[in-house]
Image (cartoon, rainbow, N blue to C red):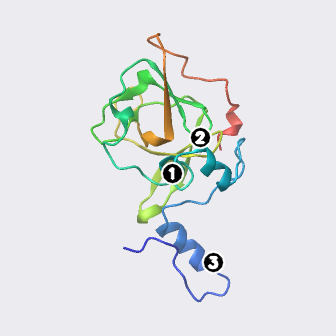
């Protein structure tokens, strides 16, 4: 199945670019994030799997992440830049094969519209480095009703001894940095 950019004979390329956004799995990269690195720099710092997901907007295979079974108190951080993204007490087993959370640490997780594979979804990314994390769906548990379905390779986990790590709001980023 072809999922790359669609070529046309449109001399301005507008139609090809519009179709490319619908068919490619990689939305346009934003350059307005606080942490900006070249692809070469990211490739030196990330594993091939992390690079494919965080920078290439890929998806890891379900049920392959060791973080699926992580139950300890702690903090889930961006594997790209270390920003705190999810508290362990917001994690739940969704049965989907990816780590799932019902609430992020605001404003450290941003969203954008994703039209890959001819579907309309809400993509979730790190508000500091723009790394692709996964998607958010409206079929999660209370209290939010949301399910942040996150690629495990896009996260790192830091265990703590406390039951609750930090308040739902974080001061690590300003609120206008997540868009």
Q: Position of residue 93 (x, y in %)?
A: 31, 32
In this view, 60 is above or below 68 = below
Query: In front of the other: label 1 or label 2?
Result: 1
In this view, 109 is above or below 119 = above
Residue, disc 1: 48
In the picture as drawn, the residue positioned furthest to the top comes out as: 162
Q: Nearer the viewer, residue 39 or 168?
A: 39
Count residues near mark 3 (Cα–Cα under 10 Å), then give few for <14, some for 14-19, many for 20+. few
Q: Which of marks 1 and 3 is nearer the N terminus?
A: 3
| Point 61% across, 44% down: residue | 45
Residue, disc 2: 80
Query: In front of the other: label 1 or label 3?
Result: 1
Residue 64's quadrant in the figure? top left
Q: Which of 89 and 42 is in front in this view?
A: 42
Mark 2 and mark 3: Cα distance apart in space: 33 Å
Q: What element carries label 3?
A: helix
Count residues near mark 1 (Cα–Cα under 10 Å), then give few for <14, some for 14-19, many for 20+. few
Residue, disc 3: 14
Mark 1 and mark 2: Cα distance apart in space: 12 Å
In this view, 113 is above or below 13 = above
Q: Where is residue 110 in the image (x, y as percent from the top left)?
A: 58, 41
Q: Earlier in the sequence, mark 1 or mark 2?
A: 1
Q: Position of residue 101 (x, y in %)?
A: 41, 32
| Point 70% across, 45% down: residue | 33
Q: Where is residue 6 in the image (x, y as percent from the top left)?
A: 51, 78
């Amino acid at each position: 199945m072809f999922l790359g950019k669609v070529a046309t004979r449109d001399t301005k390329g507008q139609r090809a670019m519009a179709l490319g956004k619908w068919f490619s799995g990689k939305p346009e990269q934003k350059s307005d994030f606080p942490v900006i690195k070249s692809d070469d720099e990211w490739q030196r710092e990330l594993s091939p799997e992390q690079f494919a997901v965080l920078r290439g907007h890929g998806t890891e295979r379900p049920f392959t992440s060791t973080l699926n079974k992580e139950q300890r108190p702690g903090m889930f951080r961006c594997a790209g830049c270390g920003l705190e993204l999810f508290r362990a007490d917001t994690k739940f087993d969704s049965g989907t094969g990816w780590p799932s959370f019902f609430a992020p640490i605001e404003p450290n997780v941003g969203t954008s519209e994703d039209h890959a594979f001819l579907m309309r979804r809400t993509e979730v990314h790190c508000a500091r480095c723009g790394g692709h994390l996964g998607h958010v769906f409206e079929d999660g548990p209370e209290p939010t009703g949301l399910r942040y379905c996150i690629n495990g390779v896009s996260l790192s986990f830091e265990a703590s001894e406390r039951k609750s790590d930090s308040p739902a709001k974080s001061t690590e980023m300003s609120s206008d940095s997540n868009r």
